[in-house]
Amino acid sequence: MQRPLDIGWLRIFEAVGRLGSLTRAANELGLSQPAVTYQIKRVEDQLGVSLLHRSQGGSRLTDAGEILFEAVKTSVESIDKAARDTRRTTQDHAVRIFTDFGFAAFWLMPRVTDFRRLHPEAEVHIIASQGLDDAMARETDAAMLFGAADDFPDTAQLLIPERVVPVCTPGFLERYGPFDDPAKFARAPLLHLEVAGKSRLLTWESWLADHGITRKPAQGDLGLNTYGFVIQAALAEQGVALGWRGLVDHHLEQGSLVAIGREVARADRGYWVVPGASVSNTTTTLLSWLINET
């Protein structure tokens, strides 16, 4: 009874037949040329036929080699497809979402928790960064980013339009308020979100300018590099923060923070959902569910 043919050589022979060169096949596969030559010689010895015409110009398949190559080529393609399908099946339930720290903590996490109660098989990974790193966003299944429509591709969908209102604790309001005149904000300690480069988010400077007031960060102000820190500082009565509706709603409903000024709305700006290049069924389900939650 003949011993079954060792199949570890399949990819090597396919590369040699496709490229017509032992050297190019070795380079593509990350092997040494002697290792490739050895594998081809083993197969020839087992089959009892020559598979290659070897010359200085390369390696050309013999008639027997052509017959075997067609079968091997089909087999390798089938194996690769099966491997891709297997990976896709095991990864279909995993979703990677990129966003900033504030949105992750105050809006996304509570909703993902609810989603996973309904879909316990889903595996969700949230990758947060205060800098909106486009390279990182492309490596994820979806991104939830702040900006205007022109900042994103046509596939993006507006999730939360920008609505901003100054917020502080009731205790802070009692000590420093009332803030019935926008000019009073210029004399209060303000909490600033500091980001690298030009901020897409509304800043205190812009909010005050909309009310005809010119003011730069001043003594008594506090700058923080994540929105979570800004809200924690507001809760600690360190100053007045700009509150993004959708992110601070929970604190406003609980009464730990109160709105103390006119709301500014910019309908052309907000948080957008940006799907990745390849979207799995689980990603589609999650994004649709999140959009319906707004």
Image: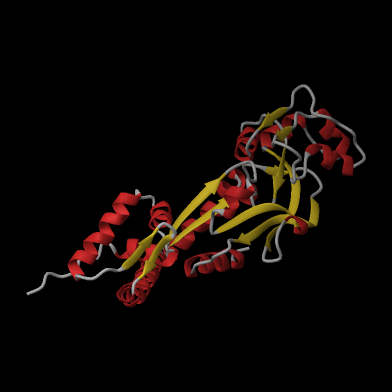
Camera-side residue of 237 and 161: 161
For the C terminus, the image quarter is bottom right
Query: Residue 83 vs residue 192: left or right?
Result: left
Residue furthest to the right in view is 212
Residue at the image point whose x is 38% and y is 57% from the top: 22
Q: Is residue 272 above or below residue 226?
A: below
Residue 28 in percent (x, y) is at: 43, 55
Q: Position of residue 240 (x, y in %)?
A: 72, 35
Residue shown at the point (30%, 75%) measured from the top left: 64
Front residue (pair 163, 282): 282
Give the vertical position of 205 relative to 24 (above or below).
Answer: above
Determine if residue 191 is in view. yes
Q: Is residue 121 visible?
A: no
Task: Give the quarter of the figure containing the N terminus.
Answer: bottom left
User: What x and y, as percent, mark residue 146?
Assistant: 69, 51
Q: Indicate whether 221 appears above or below 245.
A: above
In this rendering, would 127 be left or right of 54?
right
From the viewer's perspective, is 170 left or right of 51? right
* Extreme residue in the top direction: 219
Q: Position of residue 158 (x, y in %)?
A: 69, 62
